Image (cartoon, grey):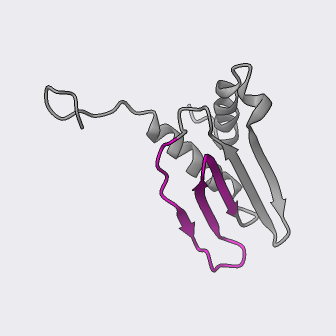
Amino acid sequence: MDMGSIAELQAWYVAQCDGDWAHTYGVQVETLDNPGWMLKIDVRDTSLEGVRFEEVKDNHDHERDWMRCWLEGDVFNGVCGPLRLEDMIRVFLDWSASSNKPMQTDGPSGRR
């Protein structure tokens, strides 16, 4: 079943709410004046803390169909054109899902 990006982000958020996380950290979705969207997700004290993220830039020079996502410290940042909010959320969710895969090992020592 495809939950959709908003429902998946809600599920990710709820999974972080362990009594402390939501009091200090969280998710912000705001509009930009150019127009567009901004997404900030603090991943401190989550399974994503310290996980490498490769910056995403898509159609960056296009007036409305653009997106950029990057990690700054422990905060996932995204900005995008007015019709790319779901795409931007999907970038975060795909990163989150890829970081939850079991670590692959090479050989009997269990080292990568």
| Residue 99 position by quadrant | top left
Q: Position of residue 46 (x, y in %)?
A: 59, 32
Q: Between 4 and 50, which is closer to the camera in this rendering?
A: 50
Question: Which quadrant of the figure has residue 32?
Answer: bottom right
- Which of the pair 106/2 is nearer the observer? 106
For residue 105, above or below residue 74 = above
Q: Is residue 64 magenta?
A: yes
Stretch of the chain drawn in magenta: 50-79
| Residue at 61% across, 46% down | 74
Give the residue displayed 55% in from the left and 68% down from the top: 57
The residue that appears at 64% across and 43% down in the rendered structure is 5
In the rendered image, the residue lying farthest to the right is 33
Residue located 66% across and 55% down the image? 77
Q: Position of residue 49 (x, y in %)?
A: 55, 39
Which residue is farthest left? Answer: 108
Residue farthest toward the top in the current orientation of the protein: 19
Identify the image quadrant of the N terminus.
top right
Is 55 included in the stretch rendered in magenta?
yes
Q: Position of residue 11 (x, y in %)?
A: 66, 29
Q: Is residue 52 above or below residue 6?
A: below
Name the quadrant containing residue 107: top left
Q: Position of residue 92 (x, y in %)?
A: 58, 47
The image quadrant where one finds the C terminus is top left
Total marks placed: 0
